[in-house]
Amino acid sequence: MTQATGSGTAAQIIDGKAISTQMKEAMKAEVVALEAKGIKPGLAVVLVGENPASVVYVRNKGKACTEVGIHSVEHKIPAETTEAQLLSLIDQLNNDPKINGILVQLPLPKHINEKRVLDAISPTKDVDGFHPFNVGKLAVGEALFPPCTPFGVIKMIEHAGVSMEGKNAVVVGRSNIVGKPVALMLLQKNATVTITHSKTKNLKEVCREADILVAAIGKANFVTADMVKPGAVVIDVGINRLDDGKLVGDVDYAPCAEVAGWITPVPGGVGPMTITMLLYNTINSAKRANGMVAETGL
């Protein structure tokens, strides 16, 4: 773990790329062991249309699968594909024994109902953890597939060597994709959790009480140094592109790094962990499909 640059005592950087590489090496060995038993984990990724960001994400997911040895199938279908056609494809994948995980890349074209599509994925292959069944399992502490980005956040805190038990954790943002699930996971780690949002009063003061601060609000440089408790763990889930093309997170990085004890960079922080946890969930799904015990690692 390296230190953030700047004057004074800088925070330790939690390097998502390095943690991701380490985890993928372990998964590679696990896939080899599964193959020796005749099991090959398989992930199907469905891309509807040519959204440039989605094309890049899908390419990165395919590359990561190849690195680890997971069987990867990409279904790239035209933007004018009907909802019925997409649901038919998902039904085929639900019934394909070679596929252990199904991921439909979002956003979908406007004529397709995202909720209907995500709900059609079998809960036993929902490696993104978005199906209502899996959201419910997470809420009661029995997660099958913890959602990948929040799951990556938890792994990063663990890799920093920070215990979450008894700590004040503040989550900035209440989305179904990050804010709510990461709060549930922090609770499961015995943290005392506060979820903040646009209606929260005295937001700055609430954040300054956080031993662990997770920023997932989608606003560039929103979290400023005066919102950070000295020595806190600051996890930046945001990724925002400025007018000059620069990528920044939800945390004003350099000033916050002077106050925090640990901090994640953007890029190179939470981002690489999202795909890594997707692979982790896919391997677990393959184990379950073959009657093996699969610990979620939560």
Image (spheres, grey):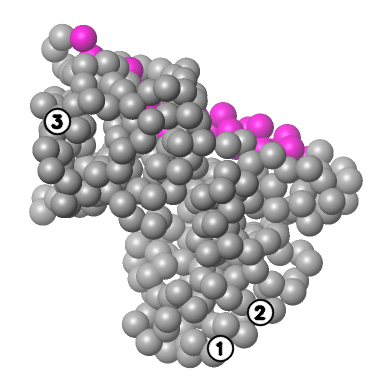
Is residue 234 in sight in this rendering?
A: no
- Which of the labelled discs sits on residue 99, or is there none? none
Q: Position of residue 104 (x, y in %)?
A: 51, 68
**In this picture, residue 112 sits left or right of residue 24:** left
Q: Mark 3 to mark 2: distance in Å?
A: 49 Å
Q: Which residue is mark 1?
A: 85
Q: Which residues are magenta?
A: 9-32
Tell me which amino acid carries mark 3.
Glu
- Residue 107 occupies quadrant: bottom left
Q: Mark 2 to mark 1: distance in Å?
A: 10 Å
Residue plotted at (89% across, 46% down): 37
- Magenta-drawn stretch, dominant element (helix, strand or loop): helix
Q: Mark 1 to mark 3: distance in Å?
A: 50 Å
Q: Is residue 179 above or below residue 15?
A: below
Mark earlier in primary sequence (1, 3): 1
Mark earlier in primary sequence (3, 2): 2
Q: Is residue 52 above or below residue 140?
A: below
Q: Which residue is mark 3?
A: 205
**Per the image, is 24 magenta?**
yes
Mark closer to the observer (1, 3): 3
Pick whichever, 290 or 175, lies toward us. 175
Residue plotted at (57% across, 83% down): 87
Mark closer to the observer (3, 2): 3
Q: Position of residue 22 (x, y in %)?
A: 56, 29
Question: Dot 2: what SS?
Answer: helix
**In this picture, residue 1 sits left or right of residue 229:** right
Q: Which residue is mark 2?
A: 91
Residue plotted at (62% across, 36% down): 297
Tell me which amino acid carries mark 2.
Asp
Q: Position of residue 135 (x, y in %)?
A: 52, 57
Mark closer to the observer (2, 1): 2
Quadrant where the N terminus lies? Answer: top left
